[in-house]
Image: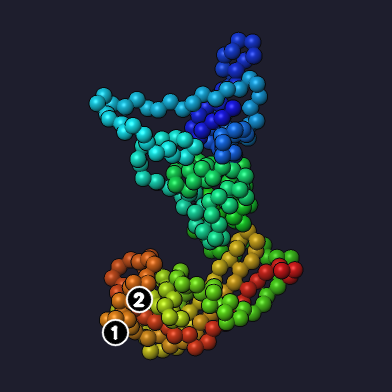
Amino acid sequence: MRAHLGDHLVIESVTTGAARRDGEIVGIHHPDGTPPYDVRWSDTDEVTLVFPGPDARVRPVEPAPEPPGTSRPEEEPSGVGGMSSHHEPPNPGDIGRRLTAARERQGLTRTETARRARMAPDYLAYLEERQADPSLASLIRLADALGVSVEALRGGGAELPPGRGQALLHPRLRDLGPEECRARLSTHGVGRIAVSASDGPSVVPVNYEVVDDAIAFRTAPGSVVAEAVGKEVAFEVDHLDEAMSQGWSVLVVGTALSVTEPEAVRRLADHAHTEPWAGGDRRMWVSIRPERVTGRRITAADQ
């Protein structure tokens, strides 16, 4: 027995041959389309893992009829699980984007992630690229493979601050060396700059880049961050692994400088990975040359 995503699994009566139960196949665990399958049953809308018996058969998904006069190429590229792509551009849903982000943070390929989650690579590609609704069983396996929670993949708690989980039973807090700090600063991301402004201290998140060992970000003239130019500031980045109750933080101290030389501005713009999330007119580049870099990491005591 072989199936594709979207096919129906039909359970027939052994005496009459009539369908007793059917459901859509929403998860395929082997690259060749053989069982088991995640099936969403039409009578209950529940998804269960099914190992089909002799009374089961696969009913292929039927393509929608095309309007008269519609021409089709002789051959279309196949989509996930052999389903036609219809040349539509990928339209990932929220789960797909979160899956991709979690996988890339771990530095994993789709093939390796699929192997860890015990599912077909084509099905993982389908989940990442389309507005899919994976079964709870699939989400549990993916969360385990990526070291995150099912809630995180679903977007639960997106409006809540990180670090709400339980602390480790035996945590170990250690200092990071200079090279470890630089590695965790990486080349870009979101960090927080602490400044002493005219109306008091402020901490502002910014999209930053690391160019020639200097931290650079864009802001708007007249903003709170712009007031920091010429002053000593602190810049901090961190990361929390909610599932493992671990994390790290890196703190940089240095003087904020305005970048105005055209060639330097062009170089920073060329290295920019993204536009500032805050939007608006943020063409003023500010650079921080680290004078002091420290970091800490929390892990389990036996790591």
Amino acid under disc 2: Leu
Q: Secondary structure at mark 1?
A: loop
Residue named by callout 1 = 261
Name which residue lies at 49% across and 37% down: 81
Residue named by callout 2 = 268
The quadrant of the image that shows the N terminus is top right
How packed mark 1 is, by other alpha carbons closer than 10 Å (few <14, some 14-19, many 20 or more), is few
Q: Secondary structure at mark 2?
A: helix
Amino acid under disc 1: Glu
Residue 142 is situated, as x and y percent measured from the top left of the image, at 59, 49
Give the CA distance from mark 1 to mark 2: 11 Å
Residue 154 vs 171, above or below: the answer is above
Name which residue lies at 49% across and 26% down: 60
Q: Closer to the N terminus: mark 1 or mark 2?
A: 1
Residue 191 is situated, as x and y percent measured from the top left of the image, at 47, 72
The quadrant of the image that shows the C terminus is bottom right
